[in-house]
Amino acid sequence: MAKVVANAIVAQSGGPTSVINSSVCGVIQEAKRSKKIGRVLAANNGILGVLKEELFDVSAEKASVINALKRTPSAAMGSCRHKLKSLDQAQADFDHVLDVFKAHQIRYFFYAGGNDSMDTADKVNKLAAQRGYELVCIGIPKTIDNDLAFTDHCPGFGSVAKYVATCAMEAGRDTDALYTHDTCTILEVMGRNAGWIAAAAGLAAREPQDAPHLVYMPEAAFTWEKFISDVREVYKRLSRVFIAVGEGLKDENGKYVTADTGAFAKDSFGHVQLGGVAEMLKAVIEKEVGIKARCNRLGTNQRAAMHFASLTDINEAYMCGKAAVKAALSGVNGKMITLVREKGAKYKCTTGLAELKDVANGEKKVPKEFINENGNHITEACRKYIGPLIKGEAPITIGKDGLPVYVRLAKKWVEKKLPRYL
């Protein structure tokens, strides 16, 4: 590394989680502890903040506030769903990113996010190498979908798994009590191409009578005939039905059961907009099975539920942030931190490394051995995989009013040094 003031920048991207701030806390605290990094800057709203040169100095934040990030949900630095195109298509954007880094003596880039974020970090890293600018880029895994390749699991998933399973348990008891009126409940959860969150809801079914009685994931081809048969079988046996379903449910042809095909059919990442699968299942159940059904959609609550976050998840997210800084200072570059589950009867997790480009182009689906033969619930192997990730509860602070206390960053803005770009 050149003998200049080496500042670092950290940014968050994609859908927020209950623990992504824990990763950022790990980055900031480890960077300050190392004394090898000057200031730690933050990009407001991910890579968009870099393009707009909207940066603030997190080194100037109170130590107590930074530490409290481990007990604060969502993305404290602001997030975005802005994907930079290829180097050929968006050369000016990438050039400007490097110009911003040069202007603020940034030599370390830590980006917390999913596949698209790792792709952006990889491209920035490659351009810096081409231009001879000394820059270290390290990715920090983040996604509730748990679909990043090359890591055993993703920070954020353990907490959403704990929350969704608990919601299924509690709403399931409601269905138990009122099955003569609200005979069927459909719990729709997030999950575009991977059914990990829907699978997590299956943890709630400890006994045959427990909700959810049916679990549907994108990895198991969905047919209406089989679905109606499943519902009828459960209703005949229990006189009630509780269903957990992922928003990305797909048919036997690999097409989404429901997707927006109108003017706003895709988000800014180019992903098909999903939602409404629960309403579709509800309509079919009421028409074909002849029982009353209701829909529960957890929405963004599932990814921001700090009040029941997994302590294991929080600790591992923090560990990833610290590991990112340690790797960068040891000479590692162009990698994403991974979580490695060690072998043995007792759960233990350490960190590893994966190439940014490999993570960007990979996707981890729920394996066949985690889905039962009927394609409508999870297996014991799935329980053993997810189970350790939801252990422990977040030590949140409760205010005098009885509600959690979450912090906000003061955001001491850094003076802009370049002409306006966006």
Image (tube, rainbow, N blue to C red):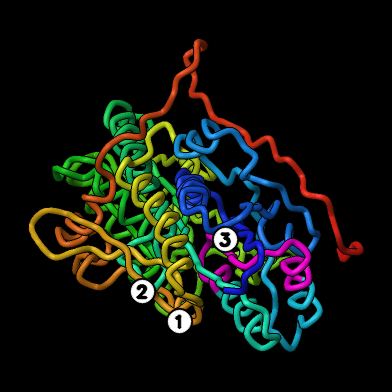
Query: Tag 1: residue type?
Result: Asp
Q: Check if residue 346 falls in the magenta segment.
A: no
How would you rate the neighbour count of disc 1 (Cα within 10 Å): few for under 14, some for 14-19, many for 20 or more?
Answer: some
- Viewer-nearest of discs 3 and 2: 2
Mark 1 in CB contact with mark 2 (< 8 angstroms): yes
| Comes first in the chain, label 3 or label 1 | 3
Q: Nearer the viewer, residue 211 or 119?
A: 119
Rounded to the nearest angstrom, the CA distance separating label 3 from label 2 is: 26 Å
**Percent x, y of residue 114:** 51, 65
Query: Tag 3: residue type?
Result: Leu
User: Relative to 339, does residue 346 appear above or below in the rendering?
Assistant: above
Q: Nearer the viewer, residue 372 or 228?
A: 372
Rounded to the nearest angstrom, the CA distance separating label 3 from label 1 is: 26 Å
Q: What residue does disc 2 label? A: 150
Point out the image quarter for the C terminus.
bottom right
- Name the disc covering residue 358, or none: 1
| Comes first in the chain, label 1 or label 2 | 2
In the image: residue 413, left or right of residue 178: right
Magenta residues, as a range?
Answer: 97-118
How would you rate the neighbour count of disc 2 (Cα within 10 Å): few for under 14, some for 14-19, many for 20 or more?
Answer: many
Residue at image position (43%, 72%) is 251
Q: What residue does disc 3 label? A: 274
Helix, strand or loop at label 2? It is loop
**Percent x, y of residue 264:** 73, 63
User: Relative to 247, does residue 147 appear above or below in the rendering?
Assistant: below
- Viewer-nearest of discs 3 and 1: 1
Residue at image position (11%, 53%) is 346
Q: Can the viewer see residue 146?
A: yes
In the image: residue 27, left or right of residue 351: right
